[in-house]
């Protein structure tokens, strides 16, 4: 399965009707947050692939279009926050947001709050294990795990509970954005049995089924 994962920045070469000609066939689009809804809708339409996403800390409550319409999510996409779903033989789950740095801000959580949110996945993970023989294949998030691909300030720190999710539930991949990594930054790290990838601004990943 060829997966296009995107986050944080509109890429001009992807925002083009010719994208499929150089990108090749894409089976699944995964949005890791902080992207305009119109951009994700465009990718869904042009690449003709299912879209699953989580919100980032800069996602708007309402997005206004030039034609006067409004939207609160990308039409046609499926929000994976606190959910797991099976797509094309892969079990995919998601957790939105980043570490809280502003009181009452949307899509921001303390370490304790994210731990509680992650616990909400447990019944689904157990069901996956009993039904499919494994817990999870891909976890998409906006923020990284604590200590992996973190930025230089507390705003771009990661969540500790993601380390525990990888330890106990062993997803093959954890995909995230949030940290706008430079070209010389480490973007892929192996942690136990999971490959952690900072997909900013996009990454094509080929996953064996």
Image: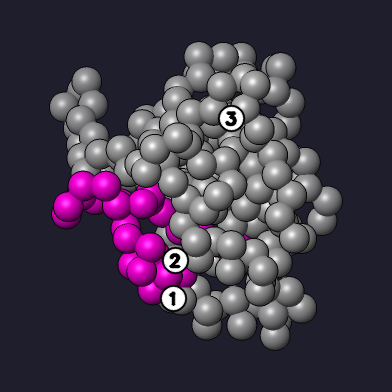
User: Pointers 1 and 2 in contact (CB under 8 A)?
Assistant: yes
- Distance (Cα) linking label 3 and label 2: 23 Å
Q: Residues within 10 Å of mark 2 (few under 14, many from 20)?
A: some
Secondary structure beneath disc 2?
Answer: loop
The residue to which callout 2 is attached is 82
Q: Earlier in the sequence, mark 3 or mark 1?
A: 1
Q: Earlier in the sequence, mark 1 or mark 2?
A: 2
How far across and down, in percent of the image, does residue 204 sit? Answer: 69, 33
- Distance (Cα) linking label 1 and label 2: 6 Å
Residue at position x 69%, y 80% from top?
A: 129
How far across and down, in percent of the image, does residue 98 sit? Answer: 38, 49
The residue to which callout 1 is attached is 120
Q: Is residue 139 above or below residue 153?
A: below
Residue 79 visible, this orientation: no
Residue at position x 50%, y 14% from top?
A: 12
103 relative to 114 in the view: left or right: left
- Residue 53 part of the magenta segment: no
The foreground one among 182 and 61 is 182
Q: Residues within 10 Å of mark 1 (few under 14, many from 20)?
A: few
Q: Which residues are magenta?
A: 90-118
């Amino acid at each position: 399965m060829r997966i296009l994962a995107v986050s944080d920045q509109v890429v001009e070469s992807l925002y083009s009707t010719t994208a499929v000609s150089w990108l090749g066939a894409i089976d699944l689009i995964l949005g890791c947050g902080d992207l305009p809804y119109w951009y994700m809708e465009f990718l869904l339409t042009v690449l003709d692939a299912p879209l699953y996403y989580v919100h980032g800390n800069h996602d708007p409550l309402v997005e206004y279009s030039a034609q006067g319409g409004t939207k609160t999510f990308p039409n046609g996409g499926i929000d994976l926050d606190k959910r797991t779903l099976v797509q094309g033989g892969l079990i995919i789950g998601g957790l939105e947001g980043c570490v809280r740095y502003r009181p009452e801000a949307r899509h921001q959580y303390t370490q304790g709050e994210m731990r509680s949110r992650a616990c909400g996945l447990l019944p689904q993970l157990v069901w996956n294990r009993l039904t499919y023989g494994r817990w999870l294949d891909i976890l998409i998030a906006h923020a990284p795990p604590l200590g992996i691909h973190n930025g230089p300030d507390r705003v771009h720190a990661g969540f500790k509970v993601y380390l525990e999710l990888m330890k106990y539930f062993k997803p093959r991949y954890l995909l995230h954005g949030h940290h706008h990594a430079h070209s010389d930054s480490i973007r892929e790290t192996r942690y136990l049995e999971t490959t952690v990838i900072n997909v900013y601004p996009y990454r094509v990943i080929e996953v064996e089924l």
